[in-house]
Image (spheres, rainbow, N blue to C red):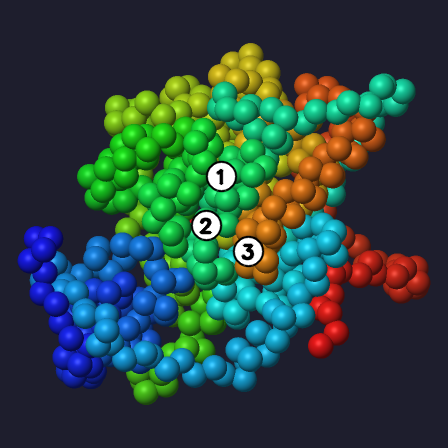
C-alpha cells in the first residue's frame, strides 16, 4: 500500500468534527472513529474534543503506540494528512496546569535529592494529577502496597565487624549478564504519562550506569524504539502480558528474541487488573455529565475503571501452567514467571524448567492482602531447599523480588535471604517524571552510594558475603497490627524533612 496512500487536507479532516462524522489525526494519519466513539474505553467526550483535529499530543501518553491501529478495522484508516494544512490545536492551559508548571519550575536541584523517597515527594507535586493517580495507585485500600515497604522493617541486620572493607564490590550477574548492582529497572506501563520521553529515560540512564531494564508490554514508546535506544551490548529484558490471541504473543516474543532481548518475564499475577480507586476516580472527574444518565454510562463500555483497566482487555484470563511448554517451544530466551506469591508455584516453575521467578504482588496493585515479595522469598528459599535440595542464590533457578524497595538496606536484606536481584519500579518513574533522564541517573547514583556505605557497615566485601546469617528475619511472617503509639514521645520526635520546592 505504501506510496498509494491518499493524502487528505487538514481542511477536509476539519469538516468531520461531530458525533455524526468524527475524524481525527494521530501521528499524521487520519482515522474515521465515528463508530468507535461509544466503544472508546476513555469515553467519547475526549475524542470529540479533538474531532476534525490532530489528537496526537493527547493520544500519546495514554496509549501504547499501536492502540489505534489494533482497535479499528483497517478501512477506518483513511490516509495521510497534508501536514501544512493542519490547523494547530489550541490547548487551553488551565489554572491547575499553570500551578503545576510553576511547581515544576521550583523543583529542587538534583543535588538536593538525597534518597528515593525525595523523588516521590517532588514527583507528586510536579506530575499531572492523572499521571500521579495512575502511577501511585494500588489495589483496594492500598494495604498490600504499604506492606511491601513495611515488610522490610521486620528484618534487622546482624553485621560483621573488623573485616577489611576498603574495597567493596556489589556487581553481580542476572541470568548470566553482568550488572553493576543487584537491582534492575522493572516494567511499568505508560511512561509518557510522566515525561514526554517515557521509557527512553530509563534506557538511556540504564546504559550509562550498566543496569538492566525490563521493557514493559504496555510501554508508551514502541518496543523497537526502546531497543533502538540501547547502546551496543546493553542488556534488556521483556515483560510479557499474554494476549488471548496467541499469534500476537508469538510474534512479539519471537521479534523480541531476534532483537536481542535476554529474558522473558511472563506476568502471571494479573489475569484481571486490580481495582485502583485513585485511578478510577480520576476517570470519573473527566466524564461529561451529559453522558451519564441515572448513574448508567450511556456508552457501551464501562469506562469508569481507570486508565490501566481500559487498555488491558487483551490480557488472557485463560493463561495456565499447560501453556508453559508452548512458550518453551516458541523461544530460547530464559523464561521467568513474574508475580509468584507462594512456594508451591515457585516449585512448579522450577519443575517446569523455567529460569526463575519474580516474587511480587505487582506493586500492591493486584490482590489486596497478598504478601510482600520479601516475605514470600523466605518461604520459597526454605521449601525449595526442603523439596529439591536447592540453595540460593542459584544460577540455575534465580529468585527476584520486587515491591516496596526504597533503600539499599532493603536490597541487601533480599540478597542475604537468597534473591539474585531486586526489581525497582515506581521510584524510577517518579525520578523521570520530575527530572527526566537526569533523575533516573541521580537515582542510580544514590543507590551506588548507599551500596558502598551499607556493604562496608555490614562487613561484606562482595555480594557473596551477604549471607543469611547477616539478617534476623524471624518476624517476617508476623503481620502484626501496630498498637497505638506513644504520642508524647512521638510528638517530641521531629519528623525528618523531605526535599522541598525552591522559593518562587
Ligand atoms: O500495574 C499496572 O498498571 C499494569 O500492569 C497495567 C496493565 C495493563 C495496562 C496498563 C497497566
The Cα–Cα distance between marks 1 and 2, rounded to whole angstroms, is 10 Å
Q: Are marks 1 and 2 in contact (CB under 8 Å)?
A: yes
Q: Are marks 3 and 2 in contact (CB under 8 Å)?
A: no
The quarter of the picture where residue 457 lies is top right
Q: Position of residue 235 (x, y in %)?
A: 46, 31
253 vs 52: above or below: above
Q: Which tag, 3 or 1, sits closer to the chain's start?
A: 1
Q: Which tag, 3 or 2, sits closer to the chain's start?
A: 2
The quarter of the picture where residue 280 lies is bottom left
Q: Kindly state the secondary structure of the residue where label 2 is placed.
A: loop
The Cα–Cα distance between marks 3 and 2, rounded to whole angstroms, is 10 Å
Q: Nearer the viewer, mark 3 or mark 1?
A: 3
Residue at (59% x, 51% y) in the render: 438
The quarter of the picture where residue 211 lies is top right
Taking 76 as reference, is 179 left or right? right
Q: Which residue bears the numbered disc 1? A: 213
The Cα–Cα distance between marks 3 and 1, rounded to whole angstroms, is 16 Å
Q: Which residue bears the numbered disc 2? A: 199
Q: Are marks 3 and 1 in contact (CB under 8 Å)?
A: no
Q: Residues within 10 Å of mark 2 (few under 14, many from 20)?
A: many
Q: Residues within 10 Å of mark 3 (few under 14, many from 20)?
A: many
Q: Is mark 2 within 8 Å of ligand 1?
A: no
Q: Which residue bears the numbered disc 3? A: 436
Residue at (20% x, 39% y) in the render: 247
Amino acid at each position: 500500500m505504501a506510496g498509494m496512500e491518499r493524502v487528505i487536507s487538514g481542511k477536509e479532516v476539519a469538516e468531520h468534527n461531530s458525533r455524526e462524522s468524527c475524524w481525527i489525526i494521530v501521528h499524521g494519519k487520519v482515522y474515521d472513529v465515528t463508530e468507535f466513539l461509544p466503544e472508546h474505553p476513555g469515553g467519547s467526550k475526549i475524542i470529540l474534543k479533538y474531532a476534525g483535529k490532530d489528537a496526537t499530543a493527547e493520544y500519546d501518553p495514554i496509549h501504547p503506540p499501536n492502540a489505534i491501529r489494533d482497535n479499528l478495522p483497517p478501512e477506518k484508516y483513511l490516509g495521510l494528512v497534508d501536514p501544512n494544512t493542519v490547523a494547530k490545536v489550541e490547548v487551553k492551559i488551565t489554572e491547575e496546569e499553570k500551578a503545576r508548571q510553576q511547581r515544576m519550575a521550583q523543583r529542587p536541584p538534583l543535588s538536593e535529592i538525597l534518597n528515593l523517597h525525595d523523588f516521590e515527594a517532588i514527583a507528586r507535586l510536579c506530575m499531572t494529577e492523572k499521571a500521579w493517580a495512575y502511577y501511585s495507585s494500588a489495589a483496594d485500600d492500598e494495604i498490600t502496597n504499604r506492606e511491601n515497604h513495611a515488610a522490610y522493617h521486620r528484618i534487622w541486620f546482624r553485621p560483621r565487624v573488623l573485616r577489611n572493607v576498603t574495597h567493596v564490590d556489589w556487581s553481580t550477574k542476572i541470568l548470566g549478564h553482568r550488572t553493576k548492582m543487584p537491582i534492575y529497572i522493572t516494567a511499568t506501563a505508560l511512561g509518557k504519562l510522566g515525561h514526554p520521553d517515557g521509557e527512553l529515560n530509563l534506557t538511556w540512564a540504564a546504559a550509562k550506569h550498566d543496569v538492566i531494564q525490563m521493557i514493559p508490554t504496555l510501554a508508551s514508546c514502541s518496543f523497537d524504539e526502546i531497543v533502538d535506544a540501547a547502546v551496543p551490548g546493553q542488556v534488556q529484558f521483556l515483560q510479557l502480558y499474554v494476549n488471548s490471541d496467541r499469534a500476537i504473543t508469538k510474534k512479539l516474543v519471537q521479534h523480541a528474541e531476534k532483537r536481542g532481548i535476554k529474558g522473558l518475564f511472563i506476568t502471571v499475577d494479573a489475569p484481571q487488573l486490580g481495582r485502583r480507586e485513585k485511578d478510577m476516580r480520576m476517570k470519573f472527574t473527566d466524564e461529561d455529565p451529559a453522558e451519564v444518565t441515572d448513574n448508567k454510562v450511556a456508552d457501551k463500555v464501562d469506562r469508569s475503571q481507570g486508565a490501566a483497566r481500559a487498555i488491558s482487555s487483551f490480557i488472557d484470563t485463560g493463561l495456565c501452567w499447560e501453556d508453559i511448554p508452548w512458550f518453551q517451544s516458541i523461544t530460547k530466551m530464559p523464561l521467568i514467571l513474574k508475580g509468584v506469591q507462594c512456594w508451591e508455584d515457585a516449585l512448579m516453575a522450577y519443575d517446569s524448567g523455567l529460569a526463575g521467578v519474580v516474587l511480587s504482588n505487582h506493586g500492591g496493585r493486584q490482590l489486596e492482602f497478598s504478601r510482600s515479595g520479601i516475605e514470600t522469598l523466605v518461604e520459597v528459599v526454605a521449601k525449595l531447599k526442603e523439596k529439591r535440595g536447592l540453595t540460593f542464590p542459584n544460577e540455575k533457578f534465580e529468585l527476584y523480588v520486587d515491591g516496596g524497595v526504597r533503600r539499599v538496606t532493603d536490597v541487601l536484606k533480599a540478597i542475604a535471604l537468597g534473591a539474585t536481584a531486586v526489581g525497582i519500579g515506581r521510584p524510577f518513574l517518579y525520578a523521570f517524571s520530575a527530572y527526566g533522564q537526569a533523575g533516573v541517573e541521580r537515582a542510580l547514583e544514590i543507590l551506588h552510594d548507599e551500596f558502598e556505605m551499607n556493604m562496608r557497615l555490614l562487613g561484606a566485601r562482595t555480594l557473596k558475603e551477604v549471607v543469611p546469617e547477616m539478617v534476623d528475619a524471624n518476624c517476617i511472617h508476623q503481620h502484626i497490627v501496630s498498637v497505638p503509639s506513644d504520642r508524647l514521645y512521638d510528638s517530641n520526635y521531629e519528623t525528618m524533612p523531605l526535599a522541598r520546592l525552591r522559593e518562587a
